[in-house]
Image: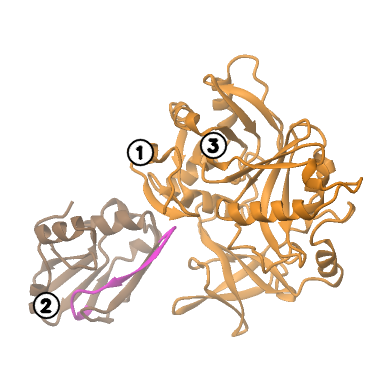
Chain colours: A orange, B brown
Amino acid sequence: MILRTPLYEEHIALGARMMPFAGYEMPVQYAGVIEEHAAVRSAAGVFDVCHMTQFRVFGFGAADFLQSVLTNDLDRISAIGAAQYSLLCDEGGGIIDDLIVYHTGDLEYMIVANAANRVTDHDWLVARLAAATAADGRPASDLVEIADESDRTGLIALQGPRALEVVGELAGEGFEPPTRFHLAEARLDGIPVLLARTGYTGEDGVEIVCHESHAPALWRALLSFPEVTPCGLGARDVLRLEMGYHLYGSDMGRGVDPVSAGLAWAVASDKGDFVGREAIERVRSRGADRKLAGLLVANGIARPGYPVLHRGTAVGKVASGTYSPVLATGIATAYLPAELAEPGTEVEVEIRRKRVVAEVVRPPFVKHTSLS
Amino acid sequence: MYPSELRYDREHEWVRVEGDEAVIGISHFAQDQLGEVVYIDLPSTGDTVSAGETFGEIESVKSVSELYSPLTGEVTAVNVALTDTPETVNEDPYGEGWMIRVKMDDPAQLDEMISAGEYEAFVNEGA
């Protein structure tokens, strides 16, 4: 069965082209990918991300439990309102999911994860909790609750250099936006929301968490501003790849460790034990065999699965690939042998019948945005 | 959206007959489905194209499609301007967005093509 977000009717009314994504019928584009991309880079774009997963983890053992299953150091978000990018890994260091964890309140955290991984993540967290013991030997499950809030939670992203201006207008006088990677309660057009200064586009902006029943009213309120353009998954993929942000399932997955994926920065080696630590540290110390590299493709669009060659020998496959309207060129990622994953290396991508030259670069592909 | 003076095929190309030559492009429906075109790969003048065979590729941000020639013949002109401004195909698919001009080997192949009305019906059936 294909699911619909609470904004489905809004998309249809706006003439969106819909496609199935992570079990949901989602808008891939409205006016067009390039126009929507430009709106986000120059003004503001609004995205339906209601399909995404939200877990609430709370209780006296919540912090200890999350510290034991997530790779990043939760102590860095000890202040309520702080947020952090982190990974959920298995014992072998394989990436189960990437997520953002928000310290939403006393003894309480909210995790926003990928829609496609909702069941996997929940089952994993529940199983780890069942197996965990608290410091005093009592079952950790006595001290922690994990609630899947996805069904009743709406999530709308407003991204772009003018996003905060729009939020300010809707929040009214005296509104102080949260700082980057922080969240705060607010009322937008009277609707109670959590406002997170995070995103997946490389532009300044917010991700707005609300009750799913309020999502359509919030969506319309945001779109009532002429500077706000509705944007689909097509533009979202281009925007995130321009920034070198990873997409789960394309740029990493269960078969890849964080070091090879270029996500070692989200793994804290100076905290206590956590699931996957040993395996990840092993890769970190001996070095990854293969690494995710960024590719600039001058004469074509390298798409996922296309072969990557070095001096005529196949060395990898394109993981993510698209056209960057900012650079007016093809951009891609691929896992390559570590010695070839160095910036400046010349490789070739086989684009159907043709082989075109690609240069290994260090993402982000687009260097200057409202965040830089 | 589908000029009546043109002939169409089910691969979404159109043909405009000018004497013994035919101008080929893609339909409004095709450009709309593709989205903003960012690359076009076309043959060169002097190349031969064959009915039912690919003569090039067209690529938008999200997808790539083959271009199929409805006719057999020698390419006498190529719209090279599309290399720099591929978006013309979106803006003016039947005019400035034309792709190649072919000297027809067998004008009877035009009979295999369908009219604007037939093409529109084909598209509306959910092509």
- Is residue A155 something one can see in this rendering? no
Mark 3 vs mark 1, CA separation in Å: 24 Å
**Do the residues at discs 3 and 2 belong to one chain?**
no
Q: Which residue is mark 3?
A: A152
Q: Which residue is mark 1?
A: A14
Determine the residue located farthest toward the top in the rendered image: A173
Q: Is residue B83 above or below residue A141?
A: below
Determine the residue located farthest toward the bottom in the rendered image: A312
Residues packed near mark 2 inside 10 Å, few (<14), some (14 to 19) or many (20 plus)? few
Figure quadrant of residue A59: top right
Name the mark nearer the viewer: 2 or 1.
Answer: 1
Q: Secondary structure beneath disc 3?
A: helix
Tell me, for residue A306, which label it has, or none. Answer: none
Asked whether the residues under the numbered discs 3 and 1 touch, taking CB atoms below 8 Å apart as contact, a structural biologist would say: no
Name the mark nearer the viewer: 3 or 1.
Answer: 3
| Left or right, residue A224 beside residue A42 | left
Residue B11 in percent (x, y) is at 24, 68
* Chain identifier of the residue bearing label 3 in the image: A
Name the mark nearer the viewer: 3 or 2.
Answer: 3
Q: Does the magenta portion include B61?
A: yes
Residue A336 in percent (x, y) is at 67, 73
| Left or right, residue A197 beside residue A62 | left
Residue in the image at 78% along x and 34% along y: A107
Figure quadrant of residue A311: bottom right
Q: Give, as a three-letter code, the residue at label 3.
A: Arg
Q: Give, as a three-letter code, the residue at label 1.
A: Leu
Residue A206 in percent (x, y) is at 60, 35
Q: Give, as a three-letter code, the residue at label 2.
A: Gln
* Chain identifier of the residue bearing label 2 in the image: B
